[in-house]
Image (tube, rainbow, N blue to C red):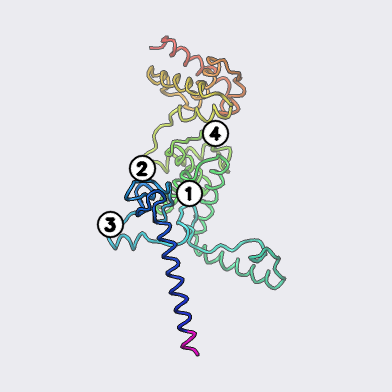
């Protein structure tokens, strides 16, 4: 009896495999000429090898995003699960227990289960932060994420800021300085390195430390870690200011033209890039007959109206060729 059942089972599996192969053959035939279809992985297309018809385009690449040139490199790069990230103190490799006392179906847990989950959360937290260095890193990365979110900075800036802080921690740059001050300076440096700078006043608005401490710590971190941070370009501030003021693309291009001309004439030397950008946006709005005020630009750029007026006159003089 068992032999018959085994035979029937093997037959059914064989028939299933044949049906799958038949259906696969049907899908791999060209709908125009019935020729053989091949996958062009380089271009992400399924093409008929006989007539050249593109049967399917934009196919999903299910392979890894990395390349390996030998077996050792392949073993080192291969991984499963979510990618690691420097924005978490354990790089995202630990287990997270949800704070909500609900099961997988969304139903509330009983009293005994809630107590059990609370104990598990407590021990999980203790295992995740086993020493003072990890607790320091966890607090700092939380601060970096909070400030980056408040300033609307992209993920690559958060990642860079986290890497800078890890380097500062590894090289013992923190003794004598606050965690908040170093993490804020890391965000400021990362934003400038990524080409999406924020002014010191904007960073200070979302930080828990004073502006003077941020500037002092920033200079110290950049010097000790030998970071290549270029001076902020006023043109990098223009798109954000123009967007917040709801100005047209024409005004934005005109503001950049004013700044480029000012740099050629040397007017930008020794001036605040934020002030120059704000003045250029204000001048460009007037030149393109768009309504805006110095008060509105001052609020968006977080800079005084007096500075905007001074830089405004200098930019127009450079535009008219009055400044050598």
CA gap, disc 2 and disc 1: 20 Å
Q: Quadrant of residue 233?
A: top left
Residue identifier under label 1: 176
Location of mark 2 (residue):
226
Q: Earlier in the sequence, mark 4 or mark 3?
A: 3
Q: Please tell me whether mark 3 sits on a helix, a strand or a loop.
A: loop
75 left or right, relative to 322: left
Q: Is residue 290 left or right of residue 234?
A: right
User: If you read the primary sequence from the N terminus, does the residue marked by circle 2 or circle 4 appear first?
Assistant: 4
Residue name at image x 50 percent, y 19 percent: 311
Q: Which residue is mark 4?
A: 201
- Closer to the chain start, of discs 3 and 1, is 3
Quarter occupied by the C terminus: top left
The region drawn magenta spans: 1-5
Residue at the location (38% across, 17% down)? 265
Residue that label 3 marks: 69
Q: How busy is the neighbourhood of tag 3: few (under 14 within 10 Å), some, or many (20 plus)? A: few
């Amino acid at each position: 009896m068992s032999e018959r059942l085994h035979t029937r089972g093997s037959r059914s599996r064989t028939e299933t495999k044949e049906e799958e192969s038949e259906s696969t053959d049907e899908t791999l035939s060209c709908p125009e000429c019935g020729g053989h279809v091949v996958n062009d992985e380089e271009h992400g297309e399924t093409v008929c090898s006989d007539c050249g018809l593109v049967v399917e385009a934009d196919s999903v690449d299910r392979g890894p995003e990395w390349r390996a040139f030998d077996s050792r490199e392949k073993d080192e790069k291969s991984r499963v699960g979510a990618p690691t990230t420097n924005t978490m103190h354990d790089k995202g490799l630990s287990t997270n227990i949800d704070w909500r006392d609900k099961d997988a179906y969304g139903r509330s847990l009983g009293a005994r289960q809630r107590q059990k989950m609370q104990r598990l959360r407590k021990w999980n937290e203790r295992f995740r932060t086993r020493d003072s260095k990890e607790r320091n890193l966890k607090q700092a990365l939380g601060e970096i994420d909070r400030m980056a979110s408040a300033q609307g900075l992209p993920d690559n800036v958060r990642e860079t800021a986290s890497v800078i802080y890890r380097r500062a921690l590894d090289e013992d740059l923190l003794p004598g300085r606050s965690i908040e001050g170093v993490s804020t300076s890391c965000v400021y440096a990362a934003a400038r390195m990524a080409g999406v700078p924020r002014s010191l006043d904007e960073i200070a608005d979302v930080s828990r430390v004073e502006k003077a401490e941020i500037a002092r710590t920033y200079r110290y971190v950049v010097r000790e870690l030998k970071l290549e941070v270029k001076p902020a370009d006023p043109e990098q501030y223009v798109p954000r200011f123009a967007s917040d003021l709801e100005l047209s693309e024409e005004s934005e291009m005109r503001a950049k033209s004013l700044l480029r001309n000012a740099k050629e004439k040397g007017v930008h030397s020794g001036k605040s890039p934020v002030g120059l950008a704000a003045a250029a946006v204000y001048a460009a709005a007037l030149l393109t007959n768009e309504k805006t005020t110095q008060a509105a630009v001052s609020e968006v750029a977080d800079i005084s109206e007096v500075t905007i007026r001074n830089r405004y006159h200098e930019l127009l003089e450079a535009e008219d060729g009055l400044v050598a």
